[in-house]
Amino acid sequence: MKKRGFTLIELLAVIVVLAIIALIAIPIVLNTIEKARKGAALDSVYVYIEEAEKVIALSQVNADKGIEIPESNQLTMGNDSDDQQLEKIKIKGTSPAYVTITFENKKIKTAGFCINGYNIDYKNQKADVSATDYCKFATVKSLVASVSSPVLSTGEKLQIDYTIEPSDVKPSFSSSNESIITVDNNGLITAKSGGEAIVTVSAGLKKVKLSINVSNDSLLGYLEQNTLENDTISDIAVNKQIYSAHIYNYTGDQVWSENMTFGNDADVGTETTSAQNMVIVKVDGNLTINENVIVTAYNTAYGGPKGMLLYVTGTLTNNGKISMTARGAKAAGQDVYLWQNADRNYEYVPASGASGATSDTNTVGVAGSSATGRMTGGGGKGSSAFTTFDGYAYGGGSSGTSYSGGSGGGGNYGNAMSVSGTKAKSNGGAGGSGAQSGTQGSSGAGNPAGNSTLKNGLGENGTGGLLIIYAESINNNGTIESKGSAGGKVASTYYGAGGGSGGGSINIFYKNSYTSNGIIDFTGGAGGAKVASSSVGPGGAGGNGSATIGSIATGTFVQN
């Protein structure tokens, strides 16, 4: 019997039947696969939650291995500190590409996941697919964030600018210290009190850190609110100025019966560098300085630190000496904001001090200008033996700065028509040198004094410095000083004398009471003296500095 094959119609019928079966079966298979993948993702969430709760419990016996729950009661992948905690949760199988967890009473309250491509919510101890697109945070390609100014004033607001890809993702914002700045969900920063804080802009696994420094209301206000670690360097921001300070802290009542010198080589200038730091000494209690005891700042031939601030929370009784004489800093000046009054205006030492005496052909030394307000004094001009050398100016003094009185100018070598004493360096730098290649004139005072080969012709090192004192009550029975240094003396008939350096700036604040039976001295350094046998005039003296004393009991400075 001859076998018969399938007809075309029969083949088509079979194909149609198979297609119908496929149309029915494939969605079922795909749905089964989808359910399996979804179930695996949900199972992974439960495993993750179980392991997380174990690690939370572990924190009770081992802080290093256990999770430390932050004050925000939230951990979100993409923040450094949060990542350090989340990395302690380890599971077998697929880990989440993104997770955010909220806690309540050290228990997991809710969580959101991107795992195996699924967005899953965990709440009420149950995991289910979420309408929230957590996975887009895990796939953020780029995040750029910036601020227009890294230094804010207290109360100032600043918007963070950012770009993100994909553009529909909104980053989250957090502050490392909300007592200094807060940042809302839209990235608006509000400055609250002085100090430095880090803003972290996060989107999934991408993050940008921005350092924000908030100006304090004043140096004194900052010290009232903060106690920094002893013998450390700290940056203090006030009115958008940054002051680098070397901090010394004392707790409890103090009686100083031996000399106290604050600061070191790292704070002061060198031949090629400027001074770096202000020295701040804070005593939390009463301070008594005994007789014959000197409290001062470290210095070298290149000057002292950028001022010394002595802050006493109780009563300061000075029976000895508090001195910034010859401790002026070799450094550019800046406005130093000491105290902010109730009307928001500042008590401050200006960046520029009084003017130095101008170079000219007058044989007589000329004094530097004396200070007004809280300024330092200017440096004096050197002198010369003769008036006949018109056109050859004799060394002028430099102007003061907030951190230093002006330096003194050099004296002329009288019988050399082509030479003259050099001018003092600016910004509390070196004094002027005596004229002639062998420096055969007397030199001016400065940081250091100018050069001179003459016996007794070398000026003294140093300028008057910045001194700030605060205490609840002050009893001054000794000396508070910041004097300039003397210029080099006249050696004989033919040699001019050096100019003196300017006096410093003394600023004293108190709240309860101030009494003084002692001395407040801010005089400029003397010009180089003439010898009896010489007709040459002395060098010009440094200008006097300033001393400003007053109460801040009402919040506004009231000068004595």
Image: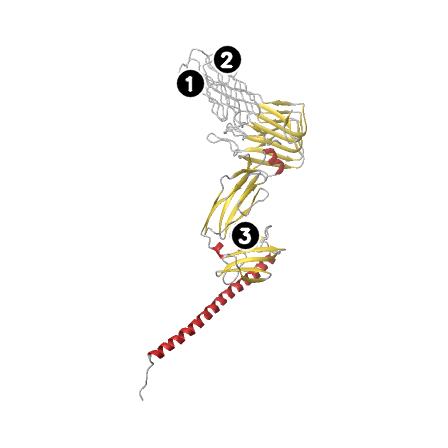
Coordinates of residue 42 in the picture (x, y in percent): 53, 63
Residue type at mark 3 is Asp
Foreground disc of the pair 2, 1: 2
Tell me residue 20's x, y (percent): 42, 74
Density class for disc 3 (Cα within 10 Å; few <14, some 14-19, many ≥20) is some
Residue at far left of view: 2
**238 shown above or below 396:** below
Residue indicated by mark 2: 537
- Amino acid under label 1? Gln
Q: Residues within 10 Å of mark 2 (few under 14, many from 20)?
A: many
Where disc 3 sits, the SS reads helix
Mark linked to residue 330: none
As measured in the structure, the alpha-carbon distance from the residue carrying label 2 to the one carrying label 1 is: 19 Å
Q: Name the front one of labels 1 and 3.
A: 3
**Quarter of the image that includes the N terminus:** bottom left
Corner quadrant of residue 53? bottom right
Q: What residue sits right under mark 3 in the picture?
A: 82
The quadrant in which residue 377 appears is top right
N-term mark: 1 or 3: 3
Q: How is the image coloured?
A: secondary structure
User: In the rendered structure, which disc, 3 or 2, sits on the residue that comes first in sequence?
Assistant: 3
Disc ID at residue 436: 1
Indicate the secondary structure of the residue bearing disc 2.
Answer: loop
Name the spot of residue 443 as percent of width and height, x first: 48, 20
Question: In the rendered image of this protein, does residue 93 appear above or below residue 417?
Answer: below
For the residues labelled 3 and 2, the Cα–Cα distance comes to 74 Å
Q: CA distance from mark 1 to mark 3?
A: 69 Å
Dot 1: what SS? loop
Residue 293 seen in the figure: no
Callout 1: 10 Å neighbours few (<14), some, many (20+)? many
Q: Is residue 496 above or below residue 11?
A: above
Q: Nearer the viewer, residue 462 or 370?
A: 370
